[in-house]
Amino acid sequence: MSKAKEIPVLVTTSHRGVFFGYTEQTDGEIIKLRAMRNCIQWRGLHGFLALASDGPNNQCKIGPKADGEIRNITGVWKCTPEAAAAWEKAPWSK
C-alpha cells in the first residue's frame, strides 16, 4: 500500500483564519496540517488567494510553524510550488 503524498494548501475558516500547511487529504470537516502557519495580515497582494498562487510577501505578517488540525473550514486551495517556497522562507513576524 502506498502512502498518500502531502500537498501544500491554503485553508480558510469561518473564524477568518488563513492557514498554510501540508496535508494528505483535503475533504472532511477536519483537516490535519503539518508545519502549518497562520497569515495574520496580508498586504500588497491582489486578494488573499494570492497566498495560494504566489505566497506571502515581505509586507505580510506570518506566524510560526506548528502541527495541528483545522476545523470550521470554509475553503481549501492547493498552493503552487512557488507559493509553498515563499511560505517556507517567510520570516516569523512577532
Image (cartoon, helix red, strand yellow):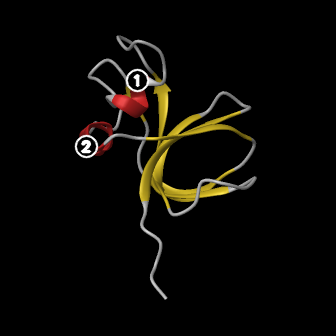
Q: Specify the amino acid type for callout 2.
A: Ala
Report whether 51 appears left or right of 81: right
Q: CA distance from mark 1 to mark 2?
A: 14 Å
Coordinates of residue 73 in the picture (x, y in percent)? 70, 41
Instruction: Identify the residue under disc 1.
Output: 50
**Mark 2, secondary structure of its residue:** helix
Q: Earlier in the sequence, mark 1 or mark 2?
A: 1
Residue sitting nearer the eye, 16 or 78? 78
Q: Label 2 near label 1: C-beta < 8 Å? A: no
Q: Residue at x 43, y 62 (%)?
A: 6
Q: Residue at x 41, y 29 (%)?
A: 51
Q: Residue at x 72, y 55 (%)?
A: 28
Residue sitting nearer the eye, 63 or 9? 9
Quadrant, the C terminus? top left
Q: Is residue 49 visible?
A: yes
Tell me, for residue 13, which label it has, or none: none
Instruction: Identify the residue under disc 2.
Output: 85
Q: Residues within 10 Å of mark 2 (few under 14, many from 20)?
A: some
Q: Hey, which quadrant is residue 35 in on the image?
A: bottom left
Q: Specify the amino acid type for callout 1.
A: Ala
Coordinates of residue 69 in the picture (x, y in percent)? 63, 56
**Mark 1, secondary structure of its residue:** helix
Report whether 30 appears left or right of 35: right
Q: Hey, which quadrant is residue 68 in on the image?
A: bottom right
Coordinates of residue 31 in the picture (x, y in percent)? 63, 55
